[in-house]
Image (spheres, rainbow, N blue to C red):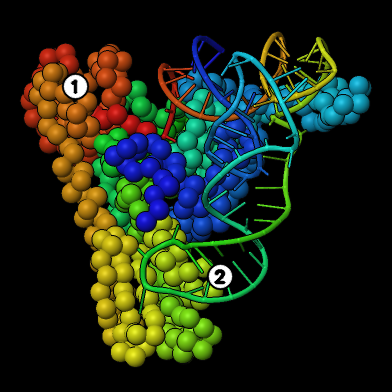
Amino acid sequence: MAKDFSTRAENYAQWYNDLVIKADLAENSAVRGCMVIKPYGYAIWERIQAVLDKKIKDTGHVNAYFPIFIPKSFFSREASHVEGFAKECAVVTHYRLKNSPDGKGIIVDEDAKLEEELIVRPTSETIIWDAYKNWIKSYRDLPLLINQWANVVRWEMRTRLFLRTTEFLWQEGHTAHATREEAVKEAETMLNVYADFAENWMSIPVIKGTKSPAERFAGAIDTYAIEALMQDGKALQAGTSHFLGQNFAKAFDVKFLSKENQLDFVWATSWGVSTRLMGALIMSHSDDNGLVLPPKLAPIQVVIVPIFKNAEQLSLISDVILPVKKALEAKGISVKYDDRDTQKPGWKFAEYEFKGIPVRLTVGPRDIEQGTVEVARRDTLEKEVLQIKDIENKISNLLDQIQKNLYDRAFAFRENNTTRVDSWKEFKEVLDTKGGFISAHWDGTSETEEKIKAETKATIRVIPFNNVLENGSCVFSGKPSTQRVLFARAY
RNA sequence: CGGGGUAUAGCGUAGCACGGUUAUCGCGCCUGCUUUGGGAGCAGGAGGUCGCAAGUUCGAAUCUUGCUACCCCGACCA
Protein backbone atom coordinates (compact mmCIF):
# COMPACT_ATOMS: atom_id res chain seq x y z
CA MET A 1 0.00 0.00 0.00
CA ALA A 2 1.16 3.49 -0.76
CA LYS A 3 2.40 5.10 2.44
CA ASP A 4 2.46 8.82 1.94
CA PHE A 5 1.80 9.66 5.56
CA SER A 6 3.74 9.29 8.79
CA THR A 7 3.39 6.50 11.29
CA ARG A 8 2.85 7.07 15.00
CA ALA A 9 6.23 5.67 15.88
CA GLU A 10 8.06 7.84 13.36
CA ASN A 11 6.52 11.12 14.36
CA TYR A 12 3.34 11.23 16.38
CA ALA A 13 2.60 14.91 15.82
CA GLN A 14 3.12 14.57 12.08
CA TRP A 15 0.97 11.44 12.02
CA TYR A 16 -1.85 13.40 13.63
CA ASN A 17 -1.58 16.28 11.16
CA ASP A 18 -1.37 13.97 8.15
CA LEU A 19 -4.37 12.05 9.39
CA VAL A 20 -6.57 15.10 9.81
CA ILE A 21 -5.68 16.34 6.33
CA LYS A 22 -5.78 13.00 4.52
CA ALA A 23 -8.98 11.80 6.15
CA ASP A 24 -10.46 15.07 4.94
CA LEU A 25 -11.53 16.23 8.39
CA ALA A 26 -10.15 19.76 8.34
CA GLU A 27 -7.46 21.98 6.93
CA ASN A 28 -5.73 25.22 7.79
CA SER A 29 -7.42 28.31 6.48
CA ALA A 30 -6.20 31.62 5.12
CA VAL A 31 -6.54 32.95 8.66
CA ARG A 32 -3.64 31.88 10.84
CA GLY A 33 -4.74 29.52 13.58
CA CYS A 34 -8.25 29.10 12.24
CA MET A 35 -9.31 25.88 10.56
CA VAL A 36 -11.79 24.95 7.90
CA ILE A 37 -13.76 21.97 9.13
CA LYS A 38 -14.46 19.95 6.00
CA PRO A 39 -17.73 18.09 5.37
CA TYR A 40 -16.54 14.73 6.65
CA GLY A 41 -15.05 16.25 9.79
CA TYR A 42 -18.11 18.38 10.32
CA ALA A 43 -20.38 15.34 9.92
CA ILE A 44 -18.59 13.75 12.89
CA TRP A 45 -18.94 16.98 14.88
CA GLU A 46 -22.65 17.02 14.01
CA ARG A 47 -22.97 13.50 15.43
CA ILE A 48 -21.25 14.67 18.61
CA GLN A 49 -23.56 17.68 18.76
CA ALA A 50 -26.70 15.68 18.16
CA VAL A 51 -25.99 13.17 20.91
CA LEU A 52 -24.78 15.73 23.44
CA ASP A 53 -27.60 18.12 22.67
CA LYS A 54 -30.09 15.41 23.53
CA LYS A 55 -28.26 14.56 26.75
CA ILE A 56 -28.18 18.22 27.72
CA LYS A 57 -31.89 18.58 27.08
CA ASP A 58 -32.67 15.31 28.84
CA THR A 59 -31.07 16.73 31.96
CA GLY A 60 -33.44 19.69 31.91
CA HIS A 61 -31.53 22.33 30.00
CA VAL A 62 -32.72 24.49 27.12
CA ASN A 63 -30.73 26.14 24.35
CA ALA A 64 -30.39 29.88 23.79
CA TYR A 65 -27.99 32.17 22.00
CA PHE A 66 -25.97 35.12 23.28
CA PRO A 67 -23.86 37.63 21.31
CA ILE A 68 -20.39 36.94 20.02
CA PHE A 69 -19.28 40.39 21.26
CA ILE A 70 -18.80 41.36 24.87
CA PRO A 71 -18.39 44.98 26.01
CA LYS A 72 -14.94 45.40 27.50
CA SER A 73 -16.35 46.74 30.77
CA PHE A 74 -18.39 43.55 31.35
CA PHE A 75 -15.32 41.54 30.94
CA SER A 76 -13.44 43.20 33.75
CA ARG A 77 -16.14 42.78 36.38
CA GLU A 78 -14.86 39.47 37.68
CA ALA A 79 -11.22 39.99 38.59
CA SER A 80 -9.75 36.52 38.19
CA HIS A 81 -11.83 35.92 35.07
CA VAL A 82 -10.27 38.88 33.22
CA GLU A 83 -6.86 37.94 34.48
CA GLY A 84 -7.25 34.47 33.05
CA PHE A 85 -8.41 35.50 29.61
CA ALA A 86 -7.01 38.99 28.99
CA LYS A 87 -3.90 37.75 27.24
CA GLU A 88 -5.79 35.91 24.52
CA CYS A 89 -8.64 38.20 23.51
CA ALA A 90 -9.44 39.51 20.05
CA VAL A 91 -10.76 43.07 20.30
CA VAL A 92 -13.04 44.97 17.94
CA THR A 93 -12.12 48.65 17.93
CA HIS A 94 -13.72 50.03 14.73
CA TYR A 95 -16.89 49.48 12.75
CA ARG A 96 -16.12 50.82 9.28
CA LEU A 97 -13.60 50.62 6.46
CA LYS A 98 -12.88 53.15 3.75
CA ASN A 99 -10.94 53.41 0.52
CA SER A 100 -7.32 54.24 1.10
CA PRO A 101 -6.45 57.84 0.05
CA ASP A 102 -3.60 56.54 -2.11
CA GLY A 103 -6.15 54.42 -3.98
CA LYS A 104 -4.43 51.19 -2.99
CA GLY A 105 -6.94 49.02 -1.23
CA ILE A 106 -9.00 49.59 1.85
CA ILE A 107 -8.14 50.83 5.32
CA VAL A 108 -9.74 51.16 8.74
CA ASP A 109 -11.71 54.39 9.03
CA GLU A 110 -10.21 56.05 12.09
CA ASP A 111 -13.34 58.17 12.45
CA ALA A 112 -15.34 55.03 13.08
CA LYS A 113 -13.80 54.18 16.42
CA LEU A 114 -16.08 52.42 18.90
CA GLU A 115 -16.86 54.28 22.14
CA GLU A 116 -16.28 51.04 23.97
CA GLU A 117 -14.24 48.23 22.49
CA LEU A 118 -15.91 44.86 22.06
CA ILE A 119 -14.22 41.62 23.02
CA VAL A 120 -14.81 38.63 20.80
CA ARG A 121 -16.03 36.09 23.36
CA PRO A 122 -13.41 33.67 24.64
CA THR A 123 -16.25 32.29 26.82
CA SER A 124 -19.62 33.82 27.62
CA GLU A 125 -19.98 34.02 31.40
CA THR A 126 -19.97 37.81 31.51
CA ILE A 127 -22.45 38.58 28.74
CA ILE A 128 -24.73 35.83 30.00
CA TRP A 129 -24.64 36.91 33.63
CA ASP A 130 -25.40 40.45 32.58
CA ALA A 131 -28.57 39.08 30.99
CA TYR A 132 -29.38 36.76 33.90
CA LYS A 133 -29.44 39.77 36.20
CA ASN A 134 -32.72 40.82 34.59
CA TRP A 135 -34.14 37.32 34.38
CA ILE A 136 -33.74 36.29 37.99
CA LYS A 137 -35.74 37.98 40.73
CA SER A 138 -37.23 35.17 42.78
CA TYR A 139 -36.55 31.60 43.84
CA ARG A 140 -39.36 30.79 41.42
CA ASP A 141 -37.04 31.76 38.54
CA LEU A 142 -34.53 29.14 39.65
CA PRO A 143 -32.88 27.00 38.66
CA LEU A 144 -32.06 28.60 35.32
CA LEU A 145 -30.59 25.92 33.09
CA ILE A 146 -29.31 27.22 29.77
CA ASN A 147 -26.92 25.94 27.13
CA GLN A 148 -25.60 27.54 23.99
CA TRP A 149 -23.83 26.13 20.94
CA ALA A 150 -21.39 28.73 19.71
CA ASN A 151 -17.99 29.62 18.40
CA VAL A 152 -15.43 31.28 20.65
CA VAL A 153 -12.06 32.89 20.00
CA ARG A 154 -8.91 32.54 22.06
CA TRP A 155 -5.81 34.09 20.54
CA GLU A 156 -3.39 31.21 21.01
CA MET A 157 0.30 31.43 20.22
CA ARG A 158 0.53 27.99 18.73
CA THR A 159 -2.35 26.12 17.23
CA ARG A 160 -3.08 22.58 16.07
CA LEU A 161 -6.05 21.39 14.07
CA PHE A 162 -8.92 20.58 16.47
CA LEU A 163 -6.69 20.43 19.54
CA ARG A 164 -6.06 24.12 19.83
CA THR A 165 -7.35 26.59 17.26
CA THR A 166 -7.89 30.32 17.51
CA GLU A 167 -11.57 29.95 16.80
CA PHE A 168 -13.32 26.81 17.94
CA LEU A 169 -16.83 25.45 18.26
CA TRP A 170 -18.29 24.31 21.54
CA GLN A 171 -21.28 24.21 23.78
CA GLU A 172 -21.29 26.15 27.01
CA GLY A 173 -23.86 25.60 29.72
CA HIS A 174 -24.54 28.38 32.21
CA THR A 175 -26.79 27.70 35.15
CA ALA A 176 -28.05 29.59 38.19
CA HIS A 177 -29.23 27.96 41.42
CA ALA A 178 -30.72 28.90 44.77
CA THR A 179 -28.26 26.91 46.86
CA ARG A 180 -24.64 26.03 46.89
CA GLU A 181 -25.44 22.33 47.14
CA GLU A 182 -27.66 22.41 44.10
CA ALA A 183 -25.01 24.19 42.01
CA VAL A 184 -22.30 21.74 43.04
CA LYS A 185 -24.63 18.89 42.17
CA GLU A 186 -25.30 20.46 38.76
CA ALA A 187 -21.58 20.73 38.02
CA GLU A 188 -21.16 17.07 38.97
CA THR A 189 -24.18 16.00 36.94
CA MET A 190 -22.84 17.60 33.81
CA LEU A 191 -19.39 16.14 34.32
CA ASN A 192 -21.10 12.75 34.51
CA VAL A 193 -22.95 13.51 31.28
CA TYR A 194 -19.61 14.24 29.60
CA ALA A 195 -18.00 11.12 31.04
CA ASP A 196 -20.91 8.98 29.88
CA PHE A 197 -20.69 10.50 26.42
CA ALA A 198 -16.92 10.00 26.21
CA GLU A 199 -17.05 6.40 27.35
CA ASN A 200 -20.22 5.11 25.75
CA TRP A 201 -20.26 7.08 22.52
CA MET A 202 -16.65 8.00 21.82
CA SER A 203 -15.29 4.78 23.39
CA ILE A 204 -12.78 6.89 25.30
CA PRO A 205 -12.23 5.95 28.95
CA VAL A 206 -11.91 9.06 31.10
CA ILE A 207 -10.97 9.87 34.65
CA LYS A 208 -13.30 12.19 36.49
CA GLY A 209 -11.92 14.49 39.08
CA THR A 210 -11.12 17.93 40.40
CA LYS A 211 -8.53 20.27 38.95
CA SER A 212 -5.78 21.66 41.12
CA PRO A 213 -5.98 25.41 41.81
CA ALA A 214 -3.39 26.10 39.12
CA GLU A 215 -5.50 24.41 36.46
CA ARG A 216 -8.79 25.85 37.62
CA PHE A 217 -11.01 27.92 35.31
CA ALA A 218 -10.57 31.66 35.73
CA GLY A 219 -13.38 32.72 38.04
CA ALA A 220 -14.33 29.29 39.37
CA ILE A 221 -14.33 27.97 42.93
CA ASP A 222 -13.85 24.43 41.66
CA THR A 223 -13.21 22.95 38.24
CA TYR A 224 -14.08 19.34 37.50
CA ALA A 225 -12.74 17.62 34.43
CA ILE A 226 -12.70 14.41 32.49
CA GLU A 227 -9.18 13.52 31.51
CA ALA A 228 -8.25 11.05 28.77
CA LEU A 229 -4.94 9.48 27.79
CA MET A 230 -3.81 9.67 24.18
CA GLN A 231 -1.73 7.01 22.43
CA ASP A 232 1.49 9.00 22.75
CA GLY A 233 1.15 9.02 26.52
CA LYS A 234 0.01 12.62 26.80
CA ALA A 235 -3.15 13.52 28.66
CA LEU A 236 -5.99 15.49 27.14
CA GLN A 237 -8.66 17.36 29.02
CA ALA A 238 -11.82 16.34 27.18
CA GLY A 239 -14.44 18.30 29.09
CA THR A 240 -14.78 20.63 32.06
CA SER A 241 -17.50 21.60 34.46
CA HIS A 242 -17.14 24.50 36.88
CA PHE A 243 -18.70 25.36 40.19
CA LEU A 244 -18.55 29.14 40.10
CA GLY A 245 -19.89 29.82 43.58
CA GLN A 246 -21.35 33.31 43.81
CA ASN A 247 -18.48 34.97 41.99
CA PHE A 248 -20.37 35.96 38.86
CA ALA A 249 -23.59 36.66 40.74
CA LYS A 250 -21.69 39.17 42.84
CA ALA A 251 -19.87 40.67 39.87
CA PHE A 252 -23.14 41.14 37.98
CA ASP A 253 -25.37 41.71 40.96
CA VAL A 254 -27.69 38.77 40.38
CA LYS A 255 -29.85 38.36 43.51
CA PHE A 256 -33.05 36.51 44.22
CA LEU A 257 -35.66 36.57 46.96
CA SER A 258 -35.94 33.23 48.69
CA LYS A 259 -39.09 31.61 50.03
CA GLU A 260 -38.15 33.15 53.35
CA ASN A 261 -38.06 36.58 51.73
CA GLN A 262 -34.29 36.75 52.04
CA LEU A 263 -32.28 38.51 49.35
CA ASP A 264 -29.26 36.46 48.30
CA PHE A 265 -26.84 36.00 45.44
CA VAL A 266 -27.46 32.99 43.19
CA TRP A 267 -25.02 30.10 42.80
CA ALA A 268 -23.62 29.32 39.39
CA THR A 269 -22.06 26.67 37.18
CA SER A 270 -20.70 26.57 33.68
CA TRP A 271 -19.55 23.59 31.63
CA GLY A 272 -18.38 22.88 28.12
CA VAL A 273 -16.89 20.59 25.54
CA SER A 274 -15.43 21.72 22.25
CA THR A 275 -14.23 20.62 18.84
CA ARG A 276 -11.18 19.46 20.76
CA LEU A 277 -13.18 16.26 21.28
CA MET A 278 -12.44 15.58 17.62
CA GLY A 279 -8.76 15.53 18.49
CA ALA A 280 -9.42 13.17 21.38
CA LEU A 281 -11.40 10.89 19.11
CA ILE A 282 -8.64 10.80 16.50
CA MET A 283 -5.78 10.24 18.94
CA SER A 284 -7.56 7.60 21.01
CA HIS A 285 -8.34 5.03 18.35
CA SER A 286 -6.65 5.71 15.04
CA ASP A 287 -3.73 3.68 13.73
CA ASP A 288 -1.05 3.86 11.03
CA ASN A 289 -3.66 3.02 8.40
CA GLY A 290 -5.69 6.08 9.22
CA LEU A 291 -8.71 7.14 11.18
CA VAL A 292 -10.67 4.65 13.28
CA LEU A 293 -14.15 5.76 14.29
CA PRO A 294 -16.40 4.30 16.96
CA PRO A 295 -19.55 3.12 15.17
CA LYS A 296 -21.86 5.26 17.29
CA LEU A 297 -20.24 8.45 15.98
CA ALA A 298 -19.34 7.38 12.45
CA PRO A 299 -21.31 9.35 9.86
CA ILE A 300 -21.14 6.25 7.66
CA GLN A 301 -21.16 2.99 9.62
CA VAL A 302 -21.10 0.55 6.75
CA VAL A 303 -19.76 1.02 3.24
CA ILE A 304 -20.55 -1.42 0.47
CA VAL A 305 -18.02 -1.75 -2.36
CA PRO A 306 -19.18 -3.70 -5.40
CA ILE A 307 -16.59 -5.35 -7.64
CA PHE A 308 -17.66 -5.24 -11.26
CA LYS A 309 -16.28 -5.22 -14.79
CA ASN A 310 -19.30 -3.82 -16.57
CA ALA A 311 -22.77 -2.41 -16.16
CA GLU A 312 -24.45 -5.81 -16.32
CA GLN A 313 -22.34 -7.15 -13.49
CA LEU A 314 -23.01 -4.07 -11.41
CA SER A 315 -26.71 -4.36 -11.91
CA LEU A 316 -26.62 -8.03 -10.85
CA ILE A 317 -24.79 -7.05 -7.68
CA SER A 318 -27.07 -4.12 -7.01
CA ASP A 319 -30.13 -6.34 -7.28
CA VAL A 320 -28.76 -8.51 -4.52
CA ILE A 321 -27.15 -5.93 -2.25
CA LEU A 322 -29.54 -2.98 -2.35
CA PRO A 323 -32.24 -4.89 -0.41
CA VAL A 324 -29.58 -5.65 2.21
CA LYS A 325 -28.70 -1.95 2.37
CA LYS A 326 -32.39 -1.12 2.89
CA ALA A 327 -32.73 -3.72 5.60
CA LEU A 328 -29.69 -2.34 7.44
CA GLU A 329 -30.98 1.20 7.13
CA ALA A 330 -34.30 0.08 8.55
CA LYS A 331 -32.36 -0.87 11.66
CA GLY A 332 -30.96 2.64 11.91
CA ILE A 333 -27.55 1.80 10.45
CA SER A 334 -26.11 4.35 8.04
CA VAL A 335 -24.92 2.68 4.88
CA LYS A 336 -23.14 4.00 1.82
CA TYR A 337 -23.19 2.06 -1.43
CA ASP A 338 -20.25 3.20 -3.49
CA ASP A 339 -20.97 2.01 -7.01
CA ARG A 340 -18.88 4.68 -8.73
CA ASP A 341 -17.00 3.39 -11.75
CA THR A 342 -14.58 6.30 -11.62
CA GLN A 343 -12.53 4.75 -8.82
CA LYS A 344 -11.20 1.24 -8.58
CA PRO A 345 -12.08 -1.14 -5.72
CA GLY A 346 -8.57 -1.07 -4.29
CA TRP A 347 -8.67 2.69 -4.23
CA LYS A 348 -11.99 2.62 -2.42
CA PHE A 349 -10.73 0.11 0.15
CA ALA A 350 -7.82 2.36 1.00
CA GLU A 351 -10.00 5.46 1.04
CA TYR A 352 -12.64 4.12 3.43
CA GLU A 353 -10.04 2.53 5.59
CA PHE A 354 -8.31 5.88 5.91
CA LYS A 355 -11.59 7.55 6.76
CA GLY A 356 -12.28 5.07 9.53
CA ILE A 357 -15.56 3.58 8.30
CA PRO A 358 -16.19 0.81 10.87
CA VAL A 359 -17.41 -1.91 8.53
CA ARG A 360 -16.87 -2.57 4.84
CA LEU A 361 -18.85 -5.04 2.78
CA THR A 362 -17.35 -6.23 -0.50
CA VAL A 363 -19.51 -7.96 -3.08
CA GLY A 364 -18.28 -9.27 -6.41
CA PRO A 365 -19.41 -11.78 -9.02
CA ARG A 366 -17.91 -14.67 -6.99
CA ASP A 367 -19.99 -13.66 -4.00
CA ILE A 368 -23.14 -13.42 -6.04
CA GLU A 369 -22.61 -17.00 -7.23
CA GLN A 370 -22.06 -18.25 -3.72
CA GLY A 371 -24.50 -15.99 -1.90
CA THR A 372 -21.76 -14.45 0.22
CA VAL A 373 -20.31 -11.08 1.23
CA GLU A 374 -16.84 -10.23 2.50
CA VAL A 375 -17.05 -8.31 5.76
CA ALA A 376 -14.05 -6.27 6.87
CA ARG A 377 -13.86 -4.51 10.22
CA ARG A 378 -11.76 -1.39 10.57
CA ASP A 379 -10.70 -1.75 14.20
CA THR A 380 -8.92 -5.10 13.80
CA LEU A 381 -8.56 -5.11 9.98
CA GLU A 382 -9.98 -8.66 10.05
CA LYS A 383 -12.04 -10.01 7.19
CA GLU A 384 -14.55 -12.82 7.10
CA VAL A 385 -16.96 -14.15 4.53
CA LEU A 386 -20.61 -14.28 5.55
CA GLN A 387 -23.77 -15.48 3.88
CA ILE A 388 -25.70 -12.56 2.40
CA LYS A 389 -28.83 -13.69 4.20
CA ASP A 390 -27.07 -13.34 7.57
CA ILE A 391 -25.76 -9.84 7.00
CA GLU A 392 -28.91 -8.08 8.08
CA ASN A 393 -28.83 -9.72 11.51
CA LYS A 394 -25.11 -9.77 12.13
CA ILE A 395 -24.06 -6.24 11.32
CA SER A 396 -25.58 -4.38 14.24
CA ASN A 397 -24.00 -6.90 16.56
CA LEU A 398 -20.68 -6.38 14.82
CA LEU A 399 -20.96 -2.62 15.20
CA ASP A 400 -21.58 -3.06 18.92
CA GLN A 401 -18.55 -5.32 19.15
CA ILE A 402 -16.38 -2.72 17.44
CA GLN A 403 -17.67 0.01 19.73
CA LYS A 404 -16.81 -2.13 22.75
CA ASN A 405 -13.47 -3.30 21.39
CA LEU A 406 -12.34 0.30 20.89
CA TYR A 407 -13.23 1.12 24.47
CA ASP A 408 -11.54 -2.01 25.85
CA ARG A 409 -8.42 -1.33 23.83
CA ALA A 410 -8.21 2.27 25.00
CA PHE A 411 -8.93 1.22 28.58
CA ALA A 412 -6.18 -1.41 28.53
CA PHE A 413 -3.79 1.17 27.09
CA ARG A 414 -4.57 3.59 29.89
CA GLU A 415 -4.18 0.90 32.55
CA ASN A 416 -0.82 -0.09 31.11
CA ASN A 417 0.25 3.51 31.02
CA THR A 418 -0.73 4.57 34.50
CA THR A 419 2.16 4.15 36.88
CA ARG A 420 2.32 4.45 40.65
CA VAL A 421 5.45 6.28 41.59
CA ASP A 422 6.95 7.01 45.00
CA SER A 423 10.26 8.73 44.32
CA TRP A 424 11.22 11.83 42.39
CA LYS A 425 13.86 9.95 40.43
CA GLU A 426 11.32 7.38 39.34
CA PHE A 427 8.84 10.12 38.53
CA LYS A 428 11.17 11.72 36.01
CA GLU A 429 12.26 8.37 34.63
CA VAL A 430 8.73 7.15 33.98
CA LEU A 431 7.74 10.48 32.49
CA ASP A 432 10.61 10.44 30.01
CA THR A 433 10.62 6.78 29.07
CA LYS A 434 7.00 5.70 29.30
CA GLY A 435 4.82 8.74 29.68
CA GLY A 436 1.20 8.29 30.57
CA PHE A 437 -0.45 9.04 33.88
CA ILE A 438 1.69 9.05 36.97
CA SER A 439 -0.11 8.43 40.23
CA ALA A 440 1.91 10.09 42.96
CA HIS A 441 1.59 11.81 46.29
CA TRP A 442 1.42 15.60 46.29
CA ASP A 443 1.68 17.90 49.26
CA GLY A 444 -1.26 19.99 48.05
CA THR A 445 0.63 23.22 47.45
CA SER A 446 0.72 25.25 44.25
CA GLU A 447 4.42 25.90 44.80
CA THR A 448 5.22 22.23 44.48
CA GLU A 449 2.99 21.83 41.44
CA GLU A 450 4.70 24.84 39.88
CA LYS A 451 8.17 23.44 40.50
CA ILE A 452 7.24 20.04 39.11
CA LYS A 453 5.88 21.70 36.00
CA ALA A 454 8.97 23.85 35.55
CA GLU A 455 11.27 20.87 35.86
CA THR A 456 9.32 18.24 33.90
CA LYS A 457 6.47 19.98 32.02
CA ALA A 458 4.13 17.57 33.77
CA THR A 459 1.07 18.99 35.52
CA ILE A 460 -1.57 17.64 37.83
CA ARG A 461 -4.24 16.56 35.40
CA VAL A 462 -6.83 15.61 37.93
CA ILE A 463 -7.42 14.70 41.55
CA PRO A 464 -9.69 11.70 40.98
CA PHE A 465 -13.12 11.61 42.58
CA ASN A 466 -13.52 8.88 45.20
CA ASN A 467 -9.78 8.87 45.59
CA VAL A 468 -8.46 6.39 48.12
CA LEU A 469 -7.06 8.33 51.06
CA GLU A 470 -3.68 7.07 52.16
CA ASN A 471 -0.86 8.62 54.08
CA GLY A 472 2.29 9.22 52.12
CA SER A 473 4.90 11.79 51.37
CA CYS A 474 4.96 14.18 48.44
CA VAL A 475 6.96 12.81 45.54
CA PHE A 476 8.70 16.17 45.12
CA SER A 477 8.89 17.87 48.51
CA GLY A 478 8.66 14.86 50.80
CA LYS A 479 6.06 16.66 52.90
CA PRO A 480 3.08 14.70 54.23
CA SER A 481 0.31 13.90 51.78
CA THR A 482 -3.09 12.28 52.15
CA GLN A 483 -3.73 11.07 48.61
CA ARG A 484 -2.28 10.38 45.18
CA VAL A 485 -3.06 12.64 42.23
CA LEU A 486 -2.56 12.03 38.52
CA PHE A 487 0.32 13.79 36.80
CA ALA A 488 1.04 13.82 33.07
CA ARG A 489 2.33 15.92 30.25
CA ALA A 490 -0.73 17.25 28.53
CA TYR A 491 -2.15 18.72 25.34
C1' C B 1 7.10 38.14 21.60
C1' G B 2 12.49 35.83 21.39
C1' G B 3 15.72 32.08 18.33
C1' G B 4 16.15 29.38 13.67
C1' G B 5 14.34 28.28 8.75
C1' U B 6 11.45 28.34 4.17
C1' A B 7 8.83 30.63 -0.09
C1' U B 8 9.16 27.63 -7.79
C1' A B 9 1.74 24.39 -11.02
C1' G B 10 -3.49 21.86 -6.48
C1' C B 11 0.53 19.08 -3.40
C1' G B 12 5.71 17.62 -2.89
C1' U B 13 10.14 19.26 -5.28
C1' A B 14 15.09 20.19 -8.95
C1' G B 15 17.54 24.39 -10.56
C1' C B 16 20.18 29.16 -7.06
C1' A B 17 27.30 29.15 -4.14
C1' C B 18 29.22 30.48 -10.41
C1' G B 19 22.89 35.12 -13.94
C1' G B 20 22.38 33.02 -20.38
C1' U B 21 17.58 28.69 -25.15
C1' U B 22 11.11 26.79 -24.23
C1' A B 23 12.06 26.34 -15.59
C1' U B 24 13.00 19.94 -13.68
C1' C B 25 10.80 15.66 -11.84
C1' G B 26 6.93 12.90 -9.05
C1' C B 27 1.82 12.81 -7.28
C1' G B 28 -2.80 14.71 -8.61
C1' C B 29 -5.92 16.56 -12.92
C1' C B 30 -7.93 15.86 -18.38
C1' U B 31 -8.44 12.45 -23.06
C1' G B 32 -8.10 7.52 -25.23
C1' C B 33 -7.30 2.27 -25.02
C1' U B 34 -6.44 -1.95 -21.95
C1' U B 35 -7.93 -2.92 -16.79
C1' U B 36 -11.15 -3.66 -12.00
C1' G B 37 -11.34 -9.12 -5.20
C1' G B 38 -6.07 -3.92 -1.50
C1' G B 39 -4.35 2.90 -3.81
C1' A B 40 -3.80 -0.22 -12.22
C1' G B 41 -0.73 0.11 -17.04
C1' C B 42 0.48 2.50 -21.56
C1' A B 43 0.10 6.74 -24.80
C1' G B 44 -1.13 11.73 -25.28
C1' G B 45 -2.47 16.51 -22.87
C1' A B 46 -3.64 20.87 -19.70
C1' G B 47 -1.71 23.60 -15.82
C1' G B 48 3.56 28.73 -13.71
C1' U B 49 2.75 36.87 -12.21
C1' C B 50 9.48 31.28 -9.74
C1' G B 51 5.86 35.10 -2.35
C1' C B 52 5.51 40.88 -3.24
C1' A B 53 8.13 45.51 -4.54
C1' A B 54 12.27 48.07 -6.05
C1' G B 55 17.40 47.80 -7.72
C1' U B 56 22.03 45.84 -10.46
C1' U B 57 22.52 43.91 -15.60
C1' C B 58 22.28 43.41 -22.67
C1' G B 59 19.78 39.51 -19.79
C1' A B 60 17.38 37.71 -12.94
C1' A B 61 13.94 31.82 -10.23
C1' U B 62 19.41 32.69 -9.58
C1' C B 63 22.79 38.78 -7.30
C1' U B 64 21.31 43.31 -3.76
C1' U B 65 17.77 45.89 -0.57
C1' G B 66 13.07 46.33 1.61
C1' C B 67 8.43 44.07 2.68
C1' U B 68 4.95 39.97 3.42
C1' A B 69 3.47 35.16 4.53
C1' C B 70 4.21 30.47 6.44
C1' C B 71 6.90 26.48 9.22
C1' C B 72 9.88 24.63 13.43
C1' C B 73 11.76 25.49 18.67
C1' G B 74 10.55 28.30 23.43
C1' A B 75 7.08 31.28 27.00
C1' C B 76 0.92 30.91 27.13
C1' C B 77 -3.35 27.66 26.67
C1' A B 78 -10.01 23.95 26.16
Q: Give the residue at x 22% y 21%.
A: A444
Q: Position of residue B8 (x, y in %)?
A: 65, 35
Label 1's element? helix
Q: Which of A151 and B7 is in front in this view?
A: B7
Q: How crowded is mark 1: few (under 14 residues within 10 Å), some or many (20 or more)?
A: some
Residue for point 41% across, 45% down: A5
Looking at the image, residue A218 lies above or below residue A414: above
Q: Mark 2 lies on which chain?
A: A
| Residue A395 tag number | none
Residue A225: image location, x then y, percent: 33, 39
Q: Where is residue A215, by image quadrant?
A: top left
Task: Identify which amino acid the numbered label 1 is placed on.
Answer: Lys
Report the quarter where the C terminus of chain A lies. Answer: top left
Q: Which amino acid does label 2 sit on?
A: Thr
Contact between labelled residues 2 and 1, with CB atoms less than 8 Å apart: no
Eye-nearest disc, 1 or 2: 2
Give me the residue at 30% from left, 35% from top.
A234
CA separation, marks 1 and 2?
54 Å
Label 2 crowding class (10 Å Cα cut-off): few <14, some 14-19, many 20+? few
The disc numbered 1 marks a residue on which chain? A
Kindly identify which residue carries mark 1.
Answer: A428
Q: Can residue A213 be seen in this view?
A: yes
Residue A169 left/right relative to A378: right
Whole-percent x and y of residue A45? 48, 54
Mark earlier in primary sequence (1, 2): 2
Picture quarter with the N terminus of chain A: bottom left
Q: Is residue A86 above or below residue A298?
A: above
* Viewer-proximal residue among A106 and A460: A106
> Which residue is disc 2 drawn over?
A342
Q: Is residue A482 visible?
A: no
The answer to whether A288 is drawn above or below residue A78 in the figure is: below
The picture places residue B74, in percent across and down from the top left corner, at 40, 17
